[in-house]
Amino acid sequence: MRSTMIFCEMEETLLLPLYATTIGYWEHQEETLRPTGFPDYQLHQVLGGKGELTIGDKRYTAGPGDIMFLYPDVPHSYTPLSREWELAWISFNGREAAQMLLYAGIRESGMGSLRAEPILNPLEEMLTLSYGNELQDNLERSKLLYSLLLDLKRSLLPASNEDNELERMKPVLQYIELHLHRPLLLKELAEVAEVSPQYLCRLFQRTVRERPVAYINKQRVNRSKQLMFSSRGQRVYEIAQRAGFENVSYFCAVFKRLTGMQPEEWRRLHGLD
């Protein structure tokens, strides 16, 4: 593939929650200095050679299989460290762009590594599409961009410390699943992980992105939905007890907060009454 750059027409795609602005491929990426950043989000995938990304006082070496993430207006620079530095990239924006990156575990400009080195399929498809700028071309690019960001969640390797924390959390999450039907104390869960209750709360926030109580309540509501399907003759208070809620009023309040409706409404909506 030869070096290329595609400028996407955005007059109509600006209305979309996510849209591509430019797409490109460089056989050799030259040094780029941006003291005031770039107006859009950017994702660069390194396909060959090595380079260096600088963001503030942080420096990253980027080689094959690495991804560089750049948020809008963040000062940065990147420069080749080898004779050839091969990159594919996409710039994008939209009201859901930050949330899609957050879904993939990306919260700020920086680096990530892929589980496999070949170019991400949606990015490759965008680069091989027609260079046309008709609405249909740009809608297809936006669909592929959405797919690309969804795929990142499973394509990116977790940071080493995050990987260790996830392993430490697995027994706790399994324990919760097995004991949802009864009260669960934070101290009890901390003993499963062999950490202090305070540190367990931090682990939950970093790995599950929720407080322990919020996570447990969400799992209990999910359990209650399964019970309403499998035990249709049971009353709401019986479902609440079996799902681990000691108080039916609290169960109804949590259920409505998470679903927008009362348990009986949810039942009728799904034809389970």
Image: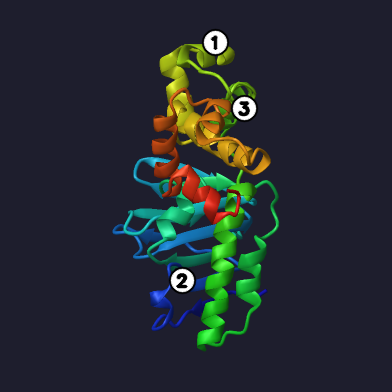
Q: SS for tag 2?
A: strand
Q: Earlier in the sequence, mark 3 or mark 2?
A: 2
Please tell me which residue lies in front, 167 or 1: 167
Residues 8 and 45: in front is: 8
State which quarter of the image contains the N terminus.
bottom right
Q: Position of residue 139 (x, y in %)?
A: 53, 78
Q: Secondary structure at mark 1?
A: helix
Alpha carbons under labels 1 and 3: distance apart: 16 Å
In depth, the one of 75 and 256 nearer the eye is: 256
Q: Residue 269: give x, y in percent of width and height.
A: 53, 55
Q: State the residue position of label 2.
A: 19
Label 2 neighbour load within 10 Å: few <14, some 14-19, many 20+: many
Residue indicated by mark 1? 191
Residue found 40% across the figure and 41% down from its top = 58
Mark 3 lies on a secondary structure that is helix
Q: Residue visible at 53% across and 16% down?
A: 189
Report whether 165 appears left or right of 178: left
Q: Amino acid at mark 1?
A: Glu
Q: Are marks 1 and 3 in contact (CB under 8 Å)?
A: no
Query: In the image, which is nearer the foreground, mark 3 or mark 2?
Result: 3
> Which residue has dot 3 on it?
177
Count of numbered marks: 3
Crowd around label 1: few <14 · some 14–19 · many ≥20 (10 Å) = few
